[in-house]
Image (cartoon, rainbow, N blue to C red):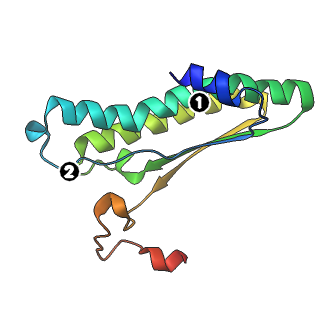
């Protein structure tokens, strides 16, 4: 699917930045989550990162070897990947996956002018958590 979309719509565009920022957290005790809940969360939080990156890497590498132009592969992760959070076990695991994948890309792409980063966001009040605030969370108005 991603390959078809890329070839039909994006292959002629000089793309220099990919920001992987899709994901959501299914809250609950792991043993109470359905197989579908787990599958959907892992699919949403990991597959787009892998498949979109795969589609753009050939272009990123070519930009550098042919024209000396650098590219950026950026991915939103979470501190939950480093500090697993009860009731967010699958989310935490998916973010650990994203972090590990990003580190692998750093090693693989070092000589091809592709900068790779994964930022580990902390608690932020967003639609992801219905704008619920706690003492550690930043609110959207802080950044407005």
**Cα distance, mark 2 to mark 1?**
27 Å
Q: Quadrant of residue 44?
A: top left
Circle 2 sits in a helix, a strand or a loop, which is it?
A: loop
Q: Which of 110/39 is in front? A: 39
Q: Which of 62/9 is in front? A: 9
Name the residue furthest right. Answer: 67
Question: Which percent across, then down, holds residue 6?
Answer: 63, 26
Q: Residue at x 72, y 30 (%)?
A: 110
Note whether residue 113 is visible: yes
Q: Residue at x 40, y 45 (%)?
A: 23
Q: Residues within 10 Å of mark 1 (few under 14, many from 20)?
A: many
Q: Which of 144/8 is in front? A: 8
Q: Is residue 138 above or below residue 73?
A: below
**Residue 32 located left or right of residue 36:** left
Which numbered tag is attached to residue 27? Answer: 2
Q: Quadrant of residue 143?
A: bottom right
Circle 1 sits in a helix, a strand or a loop, which is it?
A: helix
Report the residue marked by disc 1. 53
Question: Which percent across, then down, holds residue 117?
Answer: 60, 44
């Amino acid at each position: 699917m991603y390959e078809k979309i890329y070839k039909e719509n994006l292959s002629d565009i000089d793309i220099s930045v990919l920001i992987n920022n899709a994901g959501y957290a299914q809250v609950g005790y792991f043993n109470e989550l359905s197989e579908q809940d787990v599958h959907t969360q892992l699919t949403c939080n990991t597959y787009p990162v892998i498949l979109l990156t795969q589609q753009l890497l050939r272009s990123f590498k070519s930009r550098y070897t042919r024209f000396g132009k650098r590219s950026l592969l950026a991915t939103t992760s979470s501190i939950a990947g480093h500090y697993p959070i009860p009731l967010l076990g699958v989310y935490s695991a998916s973010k650990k996956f994203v972090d590990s994948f990003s580190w692998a890309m750093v090693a693989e792409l070092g000589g091809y002018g592709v900068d790779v980063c994964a930022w580990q966001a902390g608690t932020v009040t967003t639609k992801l958590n219905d704008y619920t605030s706690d003492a550690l969370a930043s609110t959207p108005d802080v950044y407005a």
